Image: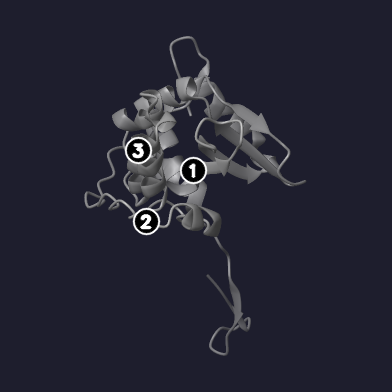
Amino acid sequence: MKQNSTQNLTMDPWFVTGFTDGEGCFSISIIRKKTCKLGWEIKLSFNFSLHKKDKALLENIQSYFGVGSISTKHGPQTIKYYVQSIKDLAIIIDHFDKYPLITQKRADYEIFKQVFYLISRKEHLTMEGLNKIVAIKASINKGLSSELKAAFPLITPVQRPKVEEILIHDPYWFLGFVEAEGCFSIMILKSKTIKTGFSVS
């Protein structure tokens, strides 16, 4: 966090990217729905799920992007920030194109972005576009559910993009990643060689 010229706290964009590399999720949902033209509904979601004690952090991320919602309906201790509308996801896409992810999550993002553009061009409303999206989903996160595999048996998963350049562009990325994935631990172990009988790490 740092202060801008108006003395309001703002979030550094590289912190957001680092935190996303650790905790963020890009998901593609394909749900059977009779009211949809092809019988399937496509939903995209960019989200974080954290312990409720970190609500202030999610509120700051929401403020940074200027879009999205925060929900407490995911368990008594869990709070979730999510962005789902195509209009709002365009802001998310713009951020990660300018401040790219560097872990293997970047591959998920690139796959997610392919579906975003297909939906933006209304291609998901055609059978050809739907098949493309199913093939893309087959390569992200846990892949296709048993229902989707049965409904689309001839689908070949697209090849996942390769993430080879692991370069930390800014210290704020490191700070965000540690905030998400880092651990500070204290270990007290019995020791025969130390006077107190214990060693501290």
* Residue at the bottom extreme, as displayed: 192
Depth-wise, is mark 2 or mark 1 nearer the camera? 2
Q: Position of residue 154 (x, y in %)?
A: 37, 56
Q: Which residue is mark 2?
A: 154
Q: Which mark is residue 104?
A: none
Residue 120 is left or right of residue 162, and the answer is right
Residue at position x 30%, y 28% in the image: 98
Location of residue 49 (image quadrant) = top right
Nearest the viewer among 6 and 83 is 83
In this rendering, the answer to whether 118 lies above or below 166 is above
Depth-wise, is mark 3 or mark 1 nearer the camera? 3
Which of the two labelled residues, at mark 3 and mark 1, occupies the earlier sequence position? 1
Label 3 Cα neighbours within 10 Å, binned few <14 / some 14-19 / many ≥20: few
Residue at position x 53%, y 88% in the image: 193
Which of the two labelled residues, at mark 2 and mark 3, occupies the earlier sequence position? 3
Q: Cα distance, mark 3 to mark 1? A: 21 Å
Residue 18 is left or right of residue 191, and the answer is left
Q: Which mark is residue 27?
A: 1
Q: Cα distance, mark 2 to mark 3? A: 13 Å
Nearest the viewer among 41 and 13 is 41
Q: Position of residue 6 (x, y in %)?
A: 48, 9
Location of residue 198 (image quadrant) = bottom right
Residue at position x 35%, y 25% in the image: 94
Q: Which residue is mark 3?
A: 128
Q: Amino acid at mark 3?
A: Glu
The secondary structure type at the circle numbered 1 is strand
Q: Which colour style is shown?
A: one colour
Q: Amino acid at mark 2?
A: Leu
The secondary structure type at the circle numbered 3 is helix
Q: Cα distance, mark 2 to mark 1? A: 22 Å
